[in-house]
Image (tube, rainbow, N blue to C red):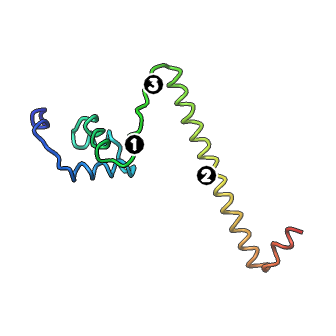
Amino acid sequence: MTSEERRMRRFSEEFRRQQVQLIESGQCSITEVSRLYEVKRENVRQWVKKFGKLPIPEVVHIQTAEEVNRVRNLENEVNKLNSIIGKLHVELLYKNELIALAKEKLGIDFEKKIKS
């Protein structure tokens, strides 16, 4: 699509509202909508500002190598913590299943016997 064709296009208000809903629900990002419909990101941000119910997320500008490394380190830490939480959740589910099986096999008094 040429720049002249892009300039001549007009999006309906309903279309803009639908795209804003997708952005606010997290199904798409501003960048994804911009690329998909070949619209400048700033225009999509204006749609969100005009039709959105949530505030526009702040744009993070990373300017130094230390900031880049800090962001990477934080992302790695988040990934590690998510992994730990996932493992603990699986372990908890496993233990709950074991308790349920023990109750089934040994009776309801099972928990009373363990606590004493």
**On the rendered image, what quadrant is the N terminus found in?**
top left
Question: Helix, strand, or loop for circle 2?
Answer: helix
Question: Helix, strand, or loop for circle 3?
Answer: loop
In contact (CB < 8 Å): disc 1 and disc 3: no
* Real-space CA distance between mark 1 and mark 2, rounded to the nearest whole angstrom: 31 Å
Type of amino acid at the residue the image marks with label 3: Ile
Residues 23 and 114: in front is: 23
Type of amino acid at the residue the image marks with label 2: Gly
Is 25 placed above or below 97 here?
above
| Residue 41 place in picture, x, y as percent | 28, 35
Image point (28%, 39%), residue name:
46
In contact (CB < 8 Å): disc 1 and disc 2: no
> How many numbered discs?
3
In the rendering, which numbered label is found on residue 62?
A: 3
**On the rendered image, what quadrant is the C terminus found in?**
bottom right
Q: Which residue is mark 1?
A: 55
Image point (73%, 78%), residue name:
104
| Residue 45 place in picture, x, y as percent | 30, 38
| Residue 29 place in picture, x, y as percent | 35, 43
Camera-nearest label, 1 or 2: 1
Is 83 placed above or below 108 here?
above
Q: Which residue is mark 2?
A: 86
In the rendered structure, the answer to whether residue 44 lies left or right of residue 88 reads left
